[in-house]
Amino acid sequence: MASVAIPGQVLGETSTHLAGPGTHITDSKIYASIIGLVTTIPTSIPSGKPTLSISRSSSTPVKDTVAIKNETLPAVGDSVVCQVTRVQQRQALCSIVVVNPTLDQAFFSSLPHIPTKADEIRFQAVLRREDVRLTEKDRIVMNEMFRVGDFIAAQVINLGDERSFYISTAGNEYGVILAKSESGSALVPRSWKDMLDSKTGKSELRKVARPS
């Protein structure tokens, strides 16, 4: 059975495979550029290399895969996925998309279709500069960590008031999970601190979540 890959996931190395559609190469490693099913295409050439490619699955309508308007009240310790709505000098403001999500292909495919109108946002969240990461907190520049429109994985650390929660990305598993570049192309993770434009290869700074 084919496995599901998300952008930034390592699929293999150029020493053993060729990079096909839906993938890219960085530092001799083959990475997923899109969300989809991983396919290994055998070579017809003696001593040749098989090709790794990713195809999008359209068997399930996006609107039926995930209940975007999650009504669960977040609690301290819960994992959440949020969309960044404003970035300020000392904090980022976000809207909580879903509580304790399953980060599978269906969920990632649904993220670009989430409504962002103010009256459709159920809960607000605040990510303070000191809660972005565990080290070098005094060197954090918020607009180098996140941009408006980014989707981030985070953890609820304080309930705040009834419509605003404090969240943290201070952990390897937390940070940006889906984003677009300045030119509008999908960004793919390269390291914990930057992502690459999937079309131009240009690097953009982010606080990146470690791909699961």
Image: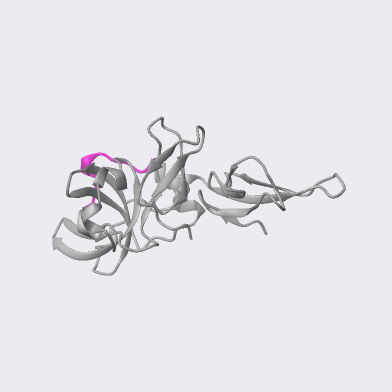
Whether 156 is drawn above or below 148: the answer is below
> In the visual, does 47 lie left or right of 113?
right
Q: Work out which residue is located at the far bottom of the displayed protein and give it.
A: 77
> In the visual, does 5 lie left or right of 16?
left
Q: Is residue 173 magenta?
A: no
Report x, y in % for residue 21.
64, 40
Report x, y in % for residue 177.
41, 51
Q: Is residue 115 magenta?
A: yes
Tell me where residue 147 sits by quadrant: top left
Tell me where residue 72 sits by quadrant: bottom left
Whether 22 is drawn above or below 193: the answer is above
The residue sitting at 25% across, 43% down in the picture is 85
How many numbered marks have been drawn onto this rendered protein structure? Answer: 0
For the N terminus, which image quadrant?
bottom right
Segment tinted magenta in the rendering:
113-123
> In the visual, does 14 lie left or right of 134?
right
Q: Nearer the viewer, residue 82 or 186?
A: 186
The residue sitting at 13% across, 59% down in the picture is 162
The residue sitting at 22% across, 43% down in the picture is 87
Q: Work out which residue is located at the far right of the displayed protein and give it.
A: 46
The residue sitting at 21% across, 41% down in the picture is 118
Report x, y in % for residue 179.
39, 43
Report x, y in % for residue 111.
40, 46
